[in-house]
Amino acid sequence: MLTLLFAAALQAAPAVPPSPPKPWDAQPADWVAIPDDQIMVITFADKRHVTIRLAAALAPQHVANIKALIAARWWDGESVYRVQENWVAQWGDASEKKALPATVVKTPAAEFEIGSFAAAARMTRSDGYSTISGFTADGWPIATDGKAAWLTLCYGSVGVARDALPDTGSGSELFTPIGQSARRLDRNYTVVGRVVEGMANLSSLPRSEAAMGVYATAAERTAIATVRLASELPAGERPQFQYRATGNPRFAAYIKSREAPETSTVPTGASVCDLAVGVRRKLAG
Amino acid sequence: MLTLLFAAALQAAPAVPPSPPKPWDAQPADWVAIPDDQIMVITFADKRHVTIRLAAALAPQHVANIKALIAARWWDGESVYRVQENWVAQWGDASEKKALPATVVKTPAAEFEIGSFAAAARMTRSDGYSTISGFTADGWPIATDGKAAWLTLCYGSVGVARDALPDTGSGSELFTPIGQSARRLDRNYTVVGRVVEGMANLSSLPRSEAAMGVYATAAERTAIATVRLASELPAGERPQFQYRATGNPRFAAYIKSREAPETSTVPTGASVCDLAVGVRRKLAG
């Protein structure tokens, strides 16, 4: 594999003894269960999944709406109808005429910001979008300008699409950034979660060259069969996820290891989105 | 289009008078021709193209190698053999055993850095990877830590794949970031150019879940029919591109307009990669 990037990753051949633990390796207790009712499973008509962790505590009004939409089976039979190159994939009701269930608040107040910058771990440097960024204790990437605080948008974040006015997104139309400039949307779109599995099923969809990347024909859309909370699925089909806790020396060392990687010729730096999604499937046994 | 992002973009209906010019609008003279021998056209077997602007002045040794490889038709019949989710697409000789032509320097010195931070326009804020970033007069995104200077890696940049040692990339295996963390590679990989057209033909390719995203089977690869310089193509097929010059008040205003967009509820900030690729097809007439 001479010319591949990061050939060092291939050096773990069976004959080589395992590396000693690194200061940034998580300990088993650092992995904490995510409640089943904070995991949203989208199943496409072709059986592929996109699985999302919901930011229940940080965008409570919109996550409540999303749970009500799931309970009403509102997305079943809808589609991914917009995929714009280096920007977003978006799903929901392509006609935008489907009535919302009575259990959904039509125009909840925007939840662009969160109460405080309660970071359990921090990046060393400021960036082009905030003075300080870091992670909540349970792993959400957050930022502040010294006054307000917010959940950042990164590649794979799930945001609430809306009209020009801030309070116009119910949560029925959702999007995820599939390019590099997600943070341009910080504090302007409510973040309700993050894709934790199946991101490639959105990011590799064909792009549309029509206005704003909305597919010009229904045939181009990716059909959604069902959207469920993990807690609704039969026990045997229910995926179980864990987040990596950030309020410990291992995670602080992990940030440092990404800001100055051992494998780099020089310290490259890092930004909060580079380290996002410390989420994994619960290990068997 | 009630719930779409940036609905304002759709307001340019025919009956509405055109908006007055903005301070950040380029003037016609700001668009400057890119020489035909700095445009590399990859044509897949299915006729789709990926077009790359070469950084001839900033990575001269590796661009010379690339031109020698094109002249030898070295990539014709090769493939895109690696597509790793939220990381890179990579192309060249999947076997890594094909001999290089005698006209190619096998192990050129790495060109991770450039001579000086000669920025004609600058971003306002530092970021997680550099103290200052900006653009060369002819539009390449660059950065510095106050000592060294380098061409940044962004989504769509074209870099030279290599082995663990720095001076091990000839330019025969190339990659482009297709996710958000391209700048993690800054100063560790030689940047030879940037995709200026057809990026979706790389970014929407199926991801491989095999090690490092290298397709496990030849059938998964995307076949490359030809790679040519635009200057080699018949005049009628030759694409002509222009870059946006950055050393003028319009580009400075453009940076400001992205750092604090009129359409945002708050200033969002921006980073150098958000503004990269000020390149377009030459307009007809």
Image (cartoon, coloured by chain):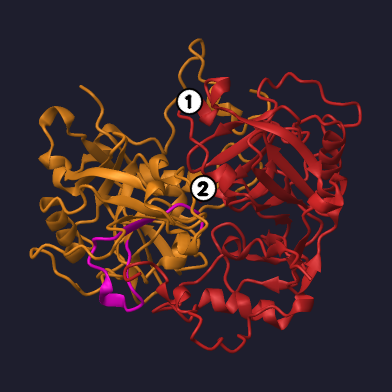
Chain colours: A red, B orange
In this orientation, which residue lies closer to the viewer: B231 or A197? Answer: A197
Query: In percent of the image, x 56 and y 48: which residue is there?
Result: A200
In this orientation, which residue lies closer to the viewer: A17 or A207? Answer: A17
Q: Which quarter of the picture shows residue B50?
A: top left
Q: Residue furthest left?
A: B102
Residue A176 visible within the image: yes
Q: Residue furthest top?
A: B15
Q: Amino acid at mark 1?
A: Ala
In the image, which residues are magenta?
B160-180
B175 is within the stretch colored magenta: yes
x then y, percent, for residue B36:
15, 42
Give residue A210's mark. Answer: 1
For residue B123, above or below residue A211: below
Query: In percent of the image, x 58 and y 52: which residue is there?
Result: A155
- Tag 1–tag 2 contact (CB < 8 Å): no
Q: Are marks 1 and 2 on the same chain?
A: yes
Circle 2 is placed at which residue position?
A179
In this orientation, which residue lies closer to the viewer: B241 or B122? Answer: B241
